[in-house]
Amino acid sequence: MTDAATCLSVRKGTKSFAGSVALDSVDFEVKGGEIHALIGENGAGKSTLAKVMAGAVPLTSGSLLIDQQVCAFHSPADGLRAGVAMVYQETSLIPSLTVAQNILLGHEPWLNSFGTAERAARQALKSLDFDVEPTALVQDIGPAERQMVEIARAVHLNARVLIFDEPTASLSPAERDKFFNLLEALRRRGKAVVFITHALEEALTISDRITVLRDGRRVVCGPAQSFDRQLLVQLMVGRDLDERSTELGHCGVGGLELLAVDSVGSGVDGPRISLSLKSGEVVGLAGLVGAGRSDLAKFIAGLSRPQNDCNWSIRLRGEAVTFNTPRDAIAAGIVYVTEDRKLDGLFETMTTDDNIYLAAQARRRGWLRIYSRAIRKRLADYWRARLAIRTLHGDAVVSVYSGGNQQKVVIAKALAQDPEVIIFDEPTRGVDVGAIPQIHDVIREVAEDGKAVLVISSYLPEILRLSDRVLVMRDGRITASFDRADASEDLIMHAAVH
Amino acid sequence: MTQAEDRSASFLRGALARSPSLRVAGRAFSERERGLLSRYPVFRRRFGDSLDAAVPLLVMCGLFAAFALLVPNYLSGSNLQQLMRDYAEPCLVALALGIVVFAGGIDLSVGAIFALAKFTALYLFRIEMWPLPVAVLGVLSVGAVIGAINGVLIAYLKTRAFLTTLAMLLILRAGLDFVTNAYTIELANAWRDTEGWYWLGAGYFLGVPSNMVILLVVALALHLFLTRLRPGLHIMATGADRKAARHAGINTRRVTLLAYVLSGLIAALAGLFYAARQSSAGSDTGLGWGVTALTAVVLGGVSLSGGGGSVGRVMIGSAILFLLMSGLLRMNMPGGASSALIGATLLGAVGIHIQWSRRRARSRSVRSPVSDQRGAP
C-alpha cells in the first residue's frame, strides 16, 4: 500500500487523552510532491493527527514511519530533525522577539546578530513574496502577518514534510491565493504537504489527495477528483446533512424597538453609529475583520468603555442606560456571546452544568445564595436538551468537548441569563459542520420568542441566511443598512471595503 | 467556492490592491521608515516603549543626584568606590534571579545559594587550605549544583518553581545554620590570605572595585549571551511562551535547567566576593537578599511572567533599590525601617507598573469603533 515515494506515514495510530479516544487506529500517509488535505469536523482528530506527525503529541499505540523506518518522536524538536515542520493552529510565535528572530527560532546559529538574522529572514520572506518587516516585533503585527511568519518559518526550515493546521483561517483572499501558490511551489519541489482545512472548496481545488476523519477514525482516503463538496460533507458528518436552502423562515419583521444605540457625534460627518434592534428580529452586522464590530458589541454589553469624546446614548426600551460592567448589562437583559470562547466564554475547568448554572447566577442579586445541585441539574438538563449538547461522561470539563459543543455551552450560558437582547459574535467560528445548522436554528428560535438578536459574522452566507436586516460596519462606523430582500453579498462587500 | 463568494473575494482582492491602508492586519512600514529603522530593536520602539524603558533609568539618575546633593562627600572618590563595592554583590544576586525570571520561572533560593557559597568559600580557602583557583571552582560548582537540583526538579520532574525554590531556601538555610555553628570557632581562628584573595575582597582595577569589575564583565557577557547566543535566545523564547518555544523545536526542559544552573553560578560568584570581603561567616548572611533581588527585578520593569526584560533593566532596578537603601541609611534612617522601605518601594513599583501597562495596552489596541477618529477613506 505504501510505495517508495511515501515519506511519512502513520500506521494504526491511536491516541487517547485521559480516557477519551482522539485517534482510533488511524492510517495516514503522505508522499513527496503531493498535497494531502486532511478534513473532518471539529473534534474529529485532525489536529491531533497532525501533532502526532510533528512530534508534539506522542502516540498511545501504533507507529510513525519516516521513509519506511519506524521512528519515535518525543518532542517537536525530534520531528524537525527528521524534516517534519508544522504550522500550528494556535500561534506559535514569541511576541517579544522580532519577526526575524522568530523565523530562525529553534535553528538559529550559535552566534547571532540582529543584522544576519534580519538578512536571512528578509530573504526567506522575500522568496515567499510575503510583505512582512523582519525587524518588527511580533507583538506589533497583525494576525495575517503572524500567519505568514509562521509559514515562512516552516518553509525556511527546508523540511521535507510540511504540515499546516488551518493555515488560511486568518488570511485575506489575496493572501490565501498567495499561500496556495506557495503550496504549489512546494509540491513542485517535491515536498510533502499536509494541510488541514475547514473550507472544503480549498481541499477540493488544491489537494491531490483527501483524507476524511470522523470521530478519530479514518473514513476515507482518495484522490481529490473522486470527491465533491456534497460527498465530503456527508463523509465528514456521517449522515445525510440536509444542506438546507440558504434562507431560514423569517417571521414578521420587528415589533417593539428594544435597543437603540447612537453616537451623538462630535465628528463633522454626522452620527457614526446608529443602531436599533427590534423584538423578534435578527440583525446581521457584517464587515471586515478590524472594522470595530466586536468593539461596538462589547461596548453595548458593558464589557468595555468608549475612549473618546463622543457622547453615546444607549436606550433600552426607550430608557437611557449606561453599563459599567457586564453584570449591569445582563441584569438589564443584554448579553454578549463572545467570539473567542476559549478566552472569555467558558470556565474551561468546570463541567457543563457548572458553566450554565454559574452563568444563571448573574441575574440573581444578594450575597447569600444556596448552591443547589437540583436546580443546577434541572437547568443544565433543560439547556442540554434544547441545544442538543452532547454529553460526555458525567463530570467532563468543557475543555474536552469539541468546538461545536463548547459553542453550544457558551450559547446556553447566555440564554440561561434570560436576556432580551442577545449579541452573537461569530456564533459558528470553529464549529463543526454538523452543529452549524443547529446553532442557526437556535438563533432564529430566540428571535421568534420575541427577543432582539444581533449577529456579527464575517461569513456572508451566514449573515444572509440569518438576518432580517443587515448592517455593514467599516472603520468604526455603520456604512450601510439593507433589508433582507435587498441584501446581497456584493452589496455588503462593497459597503465593507469602500 | 460558490459564485457569490468568489465574486466577493475578487472584489476584496481588488480593493486590497487599490488601497494599502486597507490591509487588514498590522501596519506596513514605508520605504523611508524602513531606511530609518535600525537593525536594533531598541530604536524601533514607539515613544511609549522607549519611555517605558527610560523611566527606571531616570529614577536611578534622580536618586543619585538627590543623594549627591543631600549627603556630604557623596561624590568623593572613596565614597563612590565604596558604593560600587557594596552594590556589586546584591546586583549579581539580582541578575541570578533575573535569568530565571527571563526563563519564565522564579527562584526564591538565590539568597540562600549566595550565603552558602560565602560559607563554602571561607571553608575551602581557610580551613581546607585549597589553592585559591581550586577553591573558586569549588564555590562556583556548589552554586551550579544547587541550581541544577532546582532546575532538574522544576524542568524534568515538573514541580512548581515557587514551591521548589522555597523548599530549597529552607533546606539551605537550615544546613547553613548547622555548618556555621559547627565551624564558627575554627573559622575565627583560621587565618589565611593570599594576593588573589585580597584582590577579591579589597582590590581595584583602574580604580574600580574588583567585584564591580566582575559584575560589569558578567553583565556584559550575560547580555550578549541572552541577545546573541542561541541558548540565550532560547531562554528568552521559553520564558515568553513555553509551548511556542517547544513547537519551534526548542528543548524547553534543557533550557529551563540551563537558566537555573546559570543562576546558581552567578549567585555563588556573588558569595565568593562577599566571603573575601567579610571574613566571618555569620549565619544571617544573605537573609532577605532573595526578596531584595526580587524587588530589584520588578523595579527594573522586568515582567515576572517571563520573556521580557534585560540585563540592563535588572541592573538599573538593583541600583535604584541600592541607592535608596544606602542613601537613607547615610541620612540616619533607623535600620529597621529599611525592610519596610523595600516593601513600600515594591508595592509602589508594582502599582505604577500595572497602571502604566494598562494605559499602554489601551493606547495600543487597534482601531475600536469608539476611539477611531479617522474619517472614511
Image (spheres, coloured by chain):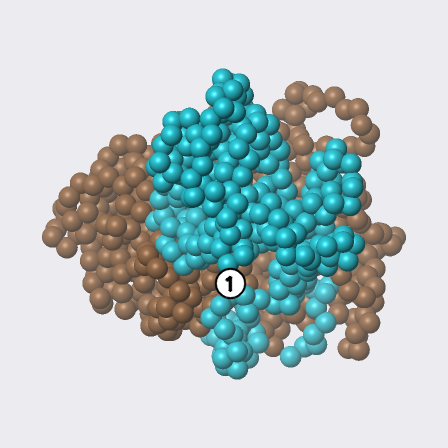
Chain colours: A brown, B cyan
Name the residue rendered at 51%, 63% in the picture: A137
> From this viewpoint, is residue A119 visible?
yes
Q: Depth check: A277 or A414 in front?
A: A414
Q: Is residue A432 above or below residue A101?
A: above
Q: Depth check: A78 or A493 in front?
A: A78
Residue highlighted by disc 1 = A137
Name the residue rendered at 81%, 66% in the picture: A309
- Where's the C terminus of chain A, which quadrant? bottom right
Name the residue rendered at 15%, 43% in the picture: A69
- Helix, strand or loop under label 1: loop
Q: Position of residue A364 (x, y in %)?
A: 78, 32
For mark 1, name the chain: A
Q: Position of residue B143 (x, y in %)?
A: 43, 35
Horizontal arrangement in the rendering, residue B186 relative to residue B364 (left or right): left
Q: Residues within 10 Å of mark 1 (few under 14, many from 20)?
A: many
Name the residue rendered at 40%, 65% in the picture: A113
